[in-house]
């Protein structure tokens, strides 16, 4: 199994500011995934991050709003830019481990005021 | 849009088997059926997955119909700690997960 650490676990931010969320994995992985879970909703895939290439964004998500870095095989960051209250959500990173299992971090609970 | 249909909620008595159904009538031949659960305020947890054969592990059993258009997740002896939202997902690969609304399972004493 893969152990995923996300930082921060939660934050309260002012609108118009940006927050960078870190995701650290205890093993090397090719792909990392970022999800958003809005209050009371299910998870929505934001983007797929491969090391050494640009992230691939899902429909409705753009790089200017959610820039992603993937500097090595164990680490990725997601930035939520120019935040508004609508960005208040839980943001989760995920990796695929052995035998086709996806593992998720515990998430970053973001509140924008 | 999610490619699965699940009941929004179910109840189960503690100690009894919980049978969670999932319809995936448009599943492709190379798509797996995955089950995850999310206990309140935690990240989703892998339960089990399968392609066409029934699968069993230490957590649950997965029964997939012969035509692969539906499946059932079975928790053989539900406990209060199994109370969670259960997601059935069909996907070619584990990373490309499209979550639906899931089934909120409540295990009652």
Image (tube, coloured by chain):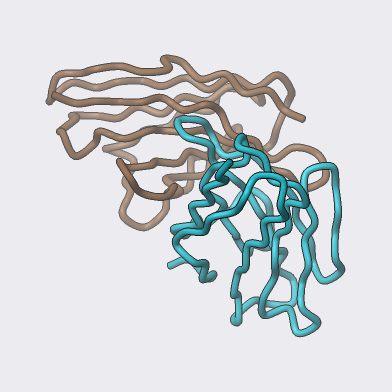
Left or right, A8 with respect to A30, comes to left
Foreground pick, B6 / B13: B13
- Please state, as top left, top right, bottom left or bottom right, where the N terminus of chain A lies in the image: top right
Q: Residue at x 31, y 46 (%)?
A: A62
Q: Residue at x 65, y 45 (%)?
A: B14
Residue A90 higher or lower than A113, as above or below: below
Residue B75 spot, x, y in % from top left: 73, 51
Residue B108 spot, x, y in % from top left: 55, 45
Res. B102 visible in picture: yes
Residue A43 higher or lower than B74, as above or below: above
Residue B29 higher or lower than B41, as above or below: below
Q: Colour of chain A?
A: brown
Res. A31 visible in picture: no
Residue A2 spot, x, y in % from top left: 72, 27
Q: Residue at x 41, y 15 (%)?
A: A8
Which chain did the renderer colour cyan? B
Q: Residue furthest bottom?
A: B67
């Amino acid at each position: 199994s893969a152990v995923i650490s996300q930082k921060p676990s939660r934050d309260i931010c002012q609108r118009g500011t940006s927050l960078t969320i870190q995701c650290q994995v205890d093993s090397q992985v090719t792909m990392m995934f970022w999800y958003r879970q809005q209050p009371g909703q299910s998870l929505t895939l934001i983007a797929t991050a491969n090391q050494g290439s640009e992230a691939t964004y899902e429909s409705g998500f753009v790089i200017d709003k959610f820039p992603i870095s993937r500097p090595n095989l164990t680490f990725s960051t997601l930035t939520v830019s120019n935040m508004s209250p609508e960005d208040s959500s839980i943001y989760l990173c995920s990796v695929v481990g052995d035998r086709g299992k996806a593992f998720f971090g515990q998430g970053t609970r973001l509140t924008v005021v | 849009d999610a490619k699965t249909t699940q009941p929004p909620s179910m109840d189960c008595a503690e100690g009894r088997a919980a049978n969670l159904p999932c319809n995936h009538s448009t599943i492709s031949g190379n798509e797996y059926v995955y089950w995850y659960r999310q206990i309140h305020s935690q990240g989703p947890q892998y339960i089990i997955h399968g392609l066409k054969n029934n699968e069993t592990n230490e957590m649950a059993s997965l029964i997939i119909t012969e035509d692969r258009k539906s499946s059932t997740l079975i928790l053989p002896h539900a406990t209060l700690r199994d109370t969670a939202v259960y997601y059935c997902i069909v996907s070619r690969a584990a990373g490309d997960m499209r979550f639906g609304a899931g089934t909120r399972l409540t295990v009652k004493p």
